[in-house]
């Protein structure tokens, strides 16, 4: 087995096996989680990318050390280059940025992500909520978004929806990520909003907890890092590939996170002008 | 509900004691694991309480101790005669391995080595004369460890003996060790015959000056680097030093040729080093000593800085307990004996060479040395398990010494006496076994566990230091 | 149309599998709708809005998976749920074994991070410290070891209770947790009777009787005999009562113990008052008169009665006291006529301590009994190695066990005694218990039959016949197989009864028939 990438937010300690899937094996300890994944899942702040997961699948725990990861007593060293999850501060061409945000929104609107929270931007997804649970869920989504006069109201989304990490949790992670991003590029401060959402969102689901913690700390997964680069670039980019890439994560997780991310862009960047008018 | 964890989860059992209970779990496919349980070391309740109370302080102190051990940079800088460099060296002072021991309590090989060293120093001509001299009270004994030195087996260092000077460049402290005499009838196994003394004299008059000049010429030799390479080449630098010796030979041979003008001397010296697979042992010991001495005097630390045996007692010193020796009887090892010898022939464990284990080498690094495992009667898997088990009683992983088979994981380093006592897991020492009669030499080799008493005493001794505060 | 579902704890499936499974499940036969969601409060509220919430889903938490189906009928719902569980591909394969053997609890937890119990059977003086360490690591403890001090037992149990853990023991020989027998226990049917026992053999007997009579066990929690004494105050017993009260799988609670201390008994009864489920108890030789009915408890005289009452409750049947008098009288008469006039005494040789108590209770009408573990007014034997008059011996007492395995494992001493009793001209009947199951002797037939044959021959050479009456505590699912053991014993001439109480009654009737 070869370790291809190591996240930059992997606290040194012992993690017990939490869950194991085809492309990912998760290890947890006290609300924090380390994910060993195959390359196609891409890098992340607490992710170890390996070319083969057999060893991870066959061990009951792993130990993260300063040198790397110890599996069944054997040390697998971390690679020279570790994945840096920080969002970098950059200067922005505001005009271009708005164009990019708009393009991203349009792209997301025309994307088919059934049963995801992108439905709040794309009404054509509504028929994908078919059974009574899904219909009730959709009604709840719409109600919350409609009543969301401030970000605090988004907390009502927590724990809602399908998926191993409930859609609402993913959405809020997307919101936090967008806030951290905007703080870096615009003269904005979301400290209070971030604190409110994060501190009040207590979950026993360690995978949700991990996503939220990373988002709160401004650590982003590789796909979102790519997205942020495209958004901040001083040219008009095509968002189709990256959006498709993001929504291919999980059943709806990627789409839900993206929805939260776009929600903030929409409110802060696209709708901001209207508000001032 | 009440008792959620028991009644609402699948039963996952840890079985401690009767092995047959495990079979039931197996037939019900209930995940379970049986402990290889051994009674723990019986420390006093008071000491256990004090240690528990101060655990946080101890952990901090141990971190510091480990950091110092890992930061060591032992360099072979020079050579000299003991009288010129070892602090407090006198003509009548004889340094020996292990904790302090009186002549009366010395084991056979140690007594033989003392006699040999007295004759070598010219203080007596025969063994009888030497013994009379000892009984007259004129001869003093002290542990090598109390004079910044180490010695393998009997570990004798006397006034005229040449020693390596190893300096820990990080902290400036220095350690000394003699040159290895080779196998067979040698002083460290208690032989004191004419040929033994003759070899020692040759080492003093020929080997020492030639090697000294070469070492000086070659410049400081980085022993940590040599040891790290040797581990990758199948040594654990206690019981196997073939790679280390070869690397050292490569480092000094060109310098010897360069600095020694007498051809015969050159040939003899090169052949001597080349012909002794254990030549490097004394250097790995001195390097370990120089590294560990820097971690002394860290109040509260339960990390061992010395494990040493004199053939009668096994002694331990801790970073947090100054110069105090904690001892217990040295045991006769259950080793693999050479043809013609048995446990009945064996002397209790002897030598300062356990300083290598104290430094994360030897038995602690045995997973690096599959060939030595065969020599001591085991399988490569055993070696892996020995090393893996040592991680349970050490303060951390080494930063430079690595085990290739564990994917270059650092060797377990910094023996934590509290973990030893609480888990009942004792340090593995990968060692040679001496014949109990002087001068017969090595009769076997094995991987043995250190005895429990010195660790119990050290645990209680450390607790005392908190009481005195 | 009805809603049915399950909560899966600690099993994690990736979101894609969850979604695909939910889609596929919707097309299963008779299934109207299906949802697979994590059990957050918010999702529960959506389930409620969509009429898919059942009361049991309330217990689910953030990290649990709820599987809910709306189906045409119960059968189809169950079928669908089974299908769904199959569909959820379980990729979570357990770690492979390695030759590395942990030496500490800490090390063991690295190999088995989900461990929830430590079974400790090391020498008593080390056991308490290990148990304490296990509790510190969040493990429940079954303390098989004895010779643990009362002080240690008390402080361990208090510590455990604070952490919602339990210490079963010390000297706890038997438990069955989530269907897995621990230490000396049997492979019994699963069912709705939850047992708590301060007596190991008692717990084995009732769980086997329940199982052999067609009902089953949800949990059998041992507490160790001393738990119900004043010094411990029933800490573990009360915890177990609380747990079984709340346990959805337990419909009937069955208590087995030697008589608890009066205060402890009342504490237990008080906690059962509002149990909301029927409680059956047997306090062997209960000295305290208590108005059990007032506390919703049906108290019984023997293990057998308690077990059968619980079985009837489980099957929703009226309890009719077992009436085997006629049959036993007949057998007793047939045996008695073969005896000589001087054959007058009963000799009970037991490996299970609780059986010795039960025997003395059942046999209270045959005259004075000597025992090395006497109850009530019975006489303490002058010499446990020598029988005199009616005698019942507990081979588990210290005088027989020092330096040897438990008599349930090692038959040597009792075998010798069987032969000795056979050569005693006054022996009228030999009464035995054979306990099988996990932890017990794996070859009971091979080990006891030679002694029985020798006893028979010894008697025969003196022109005597001595009936041997025995019970076999165990089930057909035990590795020794009860039916097999019974058949082989019968072939060796032993009269085998269903329970120890029944065996005792028969032996008593033989004695009385001789008179």
Image (cartoon, coloured by chain):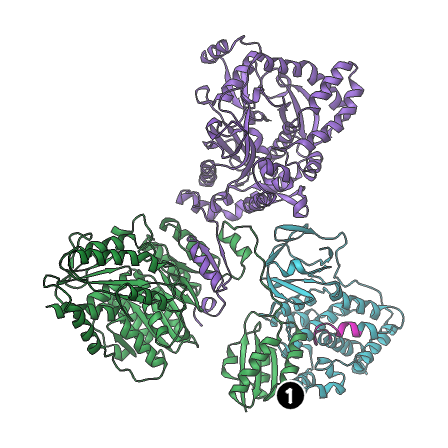
Residue at the (71%, 34%) spot, across then down: B226
Residue B109, horizontal then vertical, whole percent: 51, 22
Residue at the (58%, 59%) spot, across then down: C95
Q: Give the range drawn in magenta.
A: A243-254
Residue A104, horizontal then vertical, whole percent: 82, 76
Pick the front one: B318 or C81: C81
Q: How many labels does the image show?
A: 1
Residue C25, horizontal then vertical, whole percent: 62, 83
Pick the front one: A276 or B381: B381
Query: Helix, strand or loop at disc 1?
Result: loop
Q: The green chain is which one?
A: C
> Which part of the image, by quadrant, shows the N terminus of chain C?
bottom right
Q: Which residue lies under the disc numbered 1? A: A131
Pick the front one: C513 or B129: C513
The answer to whether residue A62 is above or below residue B228 is below
- Indicate whether residue A244 is drawn in magenta: yes
Q: In which quarter of the image is residue C27?
A: bottom right
> Chain B, which colour?
purple
- Indicate whether residue C148 is drawn in magenta: no
Q: Is residue A275 left or right of residue C372?
A: right
Residue at the (44%, 23%) spot, across then down: B105
The local crowd at label 1, few if under 14, some if 14 to 19, many if 20 or more residues have their Cα within 10 Å, is some
- Tell me, yes or no, if residue C287 can be seen here: no
User: Disc 1 is attached to a residue of which chain?
Assistant: A
Q: In this view, does C161 lie to the left or right of B295?
A: left
The answer to whether residue C450 is above or below residue B94 is below
The answer to whether residue C437 is above or below residue C329 is above
> Chain A, which colour?
cyan
């Amino acid at each position: 087995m070869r370790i291809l990438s190591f996240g930059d937010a992997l606290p040194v300690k012992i993690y017990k096996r939490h869950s194991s899937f085809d492309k990912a094996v998760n290890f947890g300890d006290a609300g924090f989680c380390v994910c060993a994944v195959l390359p196609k899942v891409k890098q992340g702040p607490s992710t170890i990318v390996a070319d083969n997961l057999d060893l991870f699948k066959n061990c009951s725990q792993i130990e993260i050390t300063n040198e790397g990861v110890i599996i069944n007593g054997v040390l697998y060293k971390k690679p020279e280059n570790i994945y840096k999850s920080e969002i970098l501060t950059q200067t922005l061409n505001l005009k271009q940025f708005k164009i990019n945000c708009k393009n991203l929104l349009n792209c997301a609107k025309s994307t088919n992500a059934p049963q995801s929270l992108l439905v709040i931007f794309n009404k054509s997804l509504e028929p994908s909520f078919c059974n009574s649970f899904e219909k009730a869920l959709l009604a709840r989504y719409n109600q919350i978004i409609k009543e969301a006069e401030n970000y605090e109201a988004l907390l009502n989304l927590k724990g809602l929806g399908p998926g191993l990490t409930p859609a609402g949790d993913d959405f809020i992670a997307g919101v936090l990520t967008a806030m951290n991003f905007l703080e870096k590029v615009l003269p904005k401060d979301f400290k209070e909003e971030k604190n409110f959402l994060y501190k009040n969102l207590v979950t026993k689901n360690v995978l949700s907890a991990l996503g939220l913690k990373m988002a709160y700390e401004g650590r982003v997964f590789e796909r979102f890092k790519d997205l942020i680069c495209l958004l901040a670039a001083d040219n008009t980019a095509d968002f189709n590939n990256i959006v498709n890439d993001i929504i291919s994560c999980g059943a709806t997780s990627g789409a839900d996170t993206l929805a939260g991310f776009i929600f903030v862009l929409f409110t802060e960047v696209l709708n901001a002008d209207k508000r001032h008018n | 509900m009440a008792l959620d964890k028991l009644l609402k989860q699948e039963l996952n059992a840890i079985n401690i004691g009767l092995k047959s209970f495990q079979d039931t779990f197996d037939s019900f496919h209930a995940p379970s694991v049986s402990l290889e349980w051994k009674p723990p070391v019986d420390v006093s309740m008071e000491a256990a309480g004090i240690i528990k109370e101060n655990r946080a302080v101890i952990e901090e102190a141990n971190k510091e101790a480990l950091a110092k051990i890992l930061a060591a940079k032992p360099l072979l800088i020079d050579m000299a005669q003991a009288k010129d460099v070892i602090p407090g060296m006198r003509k009548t002072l004889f340094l020996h391995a292990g904790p302090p021991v009186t002549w009366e309590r010395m084991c056979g090989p140690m007594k033989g080595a003392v006699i040999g060293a007295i004759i070598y120093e010219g203080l007596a001509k025969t063994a009888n004369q030497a013994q009379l001299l000892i009984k007259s009270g004129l001869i003093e004994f002290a542990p090598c460890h109390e004079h910044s030195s180490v010695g393998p087996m009997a570990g004798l260092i006397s006034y005229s003996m040449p020693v390596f000077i190893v300096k820990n460049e990080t902290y400036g402290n220095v350690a000394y060790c003699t040159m290895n005499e080779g196998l067979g009838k040698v002083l460290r196994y208690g032989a004191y015959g004419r040929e033994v003394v003759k070899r020692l004299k040759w080492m003093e008059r020929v080997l020492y000056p030639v090697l000294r000049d070469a070492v000086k010429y070659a410049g400081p030799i980085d022993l940590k680097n040599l040891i790290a390479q040797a581990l990758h080449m199948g040594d654990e630098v206690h019981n196997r030093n073939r790679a280390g010796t070869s690397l050292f030979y490569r480092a000094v041979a060109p310098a010897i040729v360069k600095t020694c003008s007498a051809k015969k001397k050159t040939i003899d010296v090169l052949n001597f080093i080349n012909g002794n697979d254990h030549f490097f042992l004394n250097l790995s010991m001195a390097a370990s000593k120089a590294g560990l001495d820097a971690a002394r005097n860290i109040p509260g630390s339960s990390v061992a800085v010395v494990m040493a045996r004199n053939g009668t007692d096994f002694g331990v010193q801790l970073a947090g307990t100054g110069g105090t020796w904690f001892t217990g009887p040295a045991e006769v090892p259950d080793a693999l004996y050479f043809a013609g010898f048995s446990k009945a022939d064996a002397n209790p464990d002897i030598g300062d060479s356990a300083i290598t284990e104290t430094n994360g080498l030897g038995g602690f690094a045995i997973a690096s040395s599959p060939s030595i495992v065969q020599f001591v009667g085991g399988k490569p898997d055993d070696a892996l398990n020995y090393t893996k088990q040592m991680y349970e009683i050490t303060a951390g992983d080494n930063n430079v010494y690595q085990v290739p088979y564990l994917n270059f994981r650092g060797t377990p380093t910094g023996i934590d006496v509290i973990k030893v006592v609480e888990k009942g897991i004792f340090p593995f020492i990968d060692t040679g076994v001496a014949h109990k009669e002087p001068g017969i030499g090595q009769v076997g080799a094995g991987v043995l566990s250190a005895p429990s008493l010195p660790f119990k005493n050290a645990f209680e001794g450390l607790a005392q230091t908190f009481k005195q505060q | 149309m009805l809603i049915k579902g399950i909560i899966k704890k600690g099993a994690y499936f990736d979101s894609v599998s969850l979604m695909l499974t939910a889609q596929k499940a919707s097309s299963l036969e008779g299934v109207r709708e299906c949802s697979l969601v994590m059990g957050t409060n918010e999702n529960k509220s959506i389930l409620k809005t969509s009429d898919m919430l059942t009361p049991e889903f309330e217990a689910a938490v953030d990290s649990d998976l709820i599987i809910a189906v709306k189906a045409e009928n119960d059968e189809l719902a169950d079928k669908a749920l089974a299908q769904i569980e199959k569909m959820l591909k379980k990729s979570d394969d357990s770690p492979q074994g390695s030759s590395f053997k942990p030496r500490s609890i800490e090390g063991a937890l690295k190999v088995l991070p989900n461990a929830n119990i430590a079974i400790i059977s090391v020498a008593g003086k080390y056991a308490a410290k290990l148990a304490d360490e296990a509790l510190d690591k969040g493990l429940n403890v079954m303390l098989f070891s004895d010779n643990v001090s009362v002080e240690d037992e008390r402080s361990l149990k208090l510590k455990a209770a604070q952490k919602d853990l339990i210490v079963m023991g010390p000297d706890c020989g038997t438990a069955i947790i989530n269907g897995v027998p621990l230490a000396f226990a049997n492979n019994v049917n699963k069912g709705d009777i939850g047992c708590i026992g301060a007596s190991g053999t008692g717990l084995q007997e009732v769980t086997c009787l329940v199982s052999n009579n067609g009902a089953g066990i949800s949990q059998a929690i041992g507490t160790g005999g001393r738990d119900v004494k004043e010094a411990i105050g029933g800490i573990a017993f009360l915890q177990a009562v609380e747990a079984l009260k709340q346990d959805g799988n337990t419909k009937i609670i069955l208590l087995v113990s030697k008589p608890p201390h009066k205060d402890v008994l009342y504490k237990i009864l008080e906690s059962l008052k509002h149990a909301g489920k029927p409680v059956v108890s047997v306090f062997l030789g209960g000295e305290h008169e208590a108005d059990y009915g007032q506390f919703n408890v049906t108290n019984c005289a023997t293990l057998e009665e308690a077990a059968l009452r619980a079985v009837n409750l489980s099957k929703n049947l009226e309890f009719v006291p077992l009436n085997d008098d006629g049959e036993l009288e007949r057998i007793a008469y047939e045996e008695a006529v073969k005896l000589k006039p001087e054959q007058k005494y009963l000799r009970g040789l037991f490996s299970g301590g609780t059986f010795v108590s039960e025997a003395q209770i059942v046999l209270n009408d045959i005259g004075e009994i000597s025992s090395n573990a006497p109850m009530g007014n019975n006489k303490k034997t002058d010499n446990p190695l020598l029988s005199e008059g009616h005698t019942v011996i507990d081979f588990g007492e210290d005088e027989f066990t020092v330096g040897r395995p438990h008599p349930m494992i090692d038959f040597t001493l009792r075998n010798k005694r069987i032969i000795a009793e056979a050569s005693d001209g006054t022996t009228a009947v030999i009464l035995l218990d054979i306990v099988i199951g996990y932890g017990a002797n794996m070859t009971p037939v091979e080990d006891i039959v030679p002694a029985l044959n020798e006893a028979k021959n010894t008697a025969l050479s003196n022109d005597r016949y001595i009936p041997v009456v025995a019970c076999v505590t165990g089930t057909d699912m035990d590795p020794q197989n009860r039916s097999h053991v019974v058949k082989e014993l019968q072939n060796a001439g032993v009269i085998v009864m269903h329970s120890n109480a029944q065996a005792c009654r028969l032996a008593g009737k033989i004695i009385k028939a001789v008179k």
